[in-house]
Amino acid sequence: MLSKMTLDDAAHLPVWRRPVTLLLLMALAMPIAFNTWSALLNNFVIEVAQFDGADIGLLHTVREIPGFLAVGVIAVLLFMREQVLGLVALILLGVATAVTAWFPSLAGILTITMLSSIGFHYYETVNQSLQLQWLDKARAPRVLGWLLAAGSAATLVAYGAIVLTWERFGLSYSFVYLLSGGLTALIAIYCMLVFPQFESRTPQLRKMVLKRRYWLYYALQFMAGARRQIFVVFAGFMMVERFGFQVHEITALYLINLVINMAAAPLFGVAVARFGERRTLMFEYAGLTIVFLAYGGIYFFGWGVVLAAVLYVVDHILFALALALKTYFQKIADPEDIAPTAAVAFTINHIAAVFLPVLLGLMWLLSPGAVFALAAAMAAVSLALATLIPRHPEKGNETRLARPVPARAA
């Protein structure tokens, strides 16, 4: 990885050493550790550490603090290249996941979760930046769809192994966490050794970038982060706490999500390219509003486990359409703004994440249905914001409230 190479020169490398291949391997590596951690988390903290709703809310608040501080990536990039930082962050995620079960107390889980979260959020910040820099605008929606499908495939293998072997071989949390985290770290180390450092066509700014014309992108990121917290923290927790799902059962539900996403993710990229970001995001947010209202109905009206499982699957499918938000920003951004704005956007995305899980954890103790009703309201606000995206977003035409650039007007 000591050698440096421009993206144009990289086109002459063997396929297995090109930038898109590196993005693919990173897309495969991250979910092996992170999604295995997520699949076991609710059962692990309830069975081993006796967590309640308030504890799980606190855990996810701690987990999201590094996301809120993702803007610190800009400072790190003064000393380290994005590609290197992304792989180092993957190694940290893998190692922290590997040792998770060694600390089965509240303090231990919070500490190791903080470390793995630093790796996850710094990786995600850099990965999004590299994707938008290395992929041209015409190919980006389709390639992003394929990368999403690749991540789903990697997770499918991990979840399938859990479903097939957890009860049969009496696996322990320690063994599964160690295996999945170690594999992620090994893939990241392989990438550091095999791939050269790719030089982006446009040098990235190494300072915080906040521009008024990006306001709609910032607003959508904020709402996405707030809404996502409710699903990530409480949807899976509900399946375990209310319906008594075991590890292999909740993982089987994840498997259904993955199979669907593997088939649908490439189609999502095609849909974004054909219908545009506005229509795609409006469809996502309208669907999420309905889903969260139905989640609330499970508690308010006593609807059953089958509906809850169906909603969980639909929820995952709709969230995959969020790749349209990436391509929207790619179209309106100055090329040199991509890296710093990715860091700023991650911080904005996680503003609500710092306080929302712990507050909603307390609300959960009083009324779980009210938590999902709040999520539905957030999705409805996102839907209203999405209507402001132009059919053909670009610099100077960032929102439907902006005056189009002269070329577009002509």
Image (cartoon, rainbow, N blue to C red):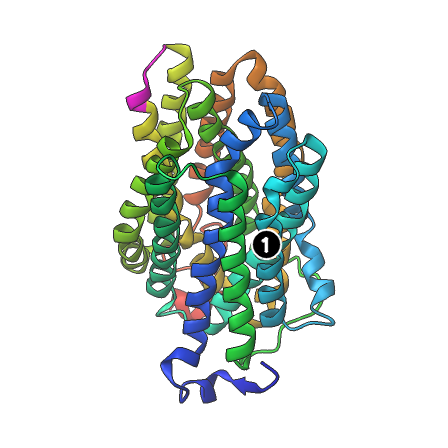
- Taking depth in this image into account, of 174 and 50 the one nearest to the observer is 174
- Residue range of the region highlighted in magenta in the rendering: 302-307
Reading the image, the residue beneath label 1 is: 93
Residue in the image at 58% along x and 65% along y: 86
| Image side of residue 80 versus residue 308, left or right | right
Q: Quadrant of residue 64?
A: top right
Where residue 124 appears, x then y in whole percent?
A: 55, 56
Residue in the image at 27% along x and 51% along y: 264
Residue 160, magenta (yes or no): no
Where residue 163 appears, x then y in whole percent?
A: 35, 39
Instruction: Please identify the quadrant where the N terminus is shown.
Output: bottom right
> Is residue 287 visible in the rendered structure shown here?
no
Can you say whether 381 is above or below 363 in the image? below
Residue in the image at 55% along x and 42% along y: 174
> Is residue 318 visible in the rendered structure shown here?
yes
Can you say whether 162 is above or below 276 in the image? above
- Taking depth in this image into account, of 30 and 280 the one nearest to the observer is 30
Residue 304, magenta (yes or no): yes
- Taking depth in this image into account, of 377 and 105 the one nearest to the observer is 105
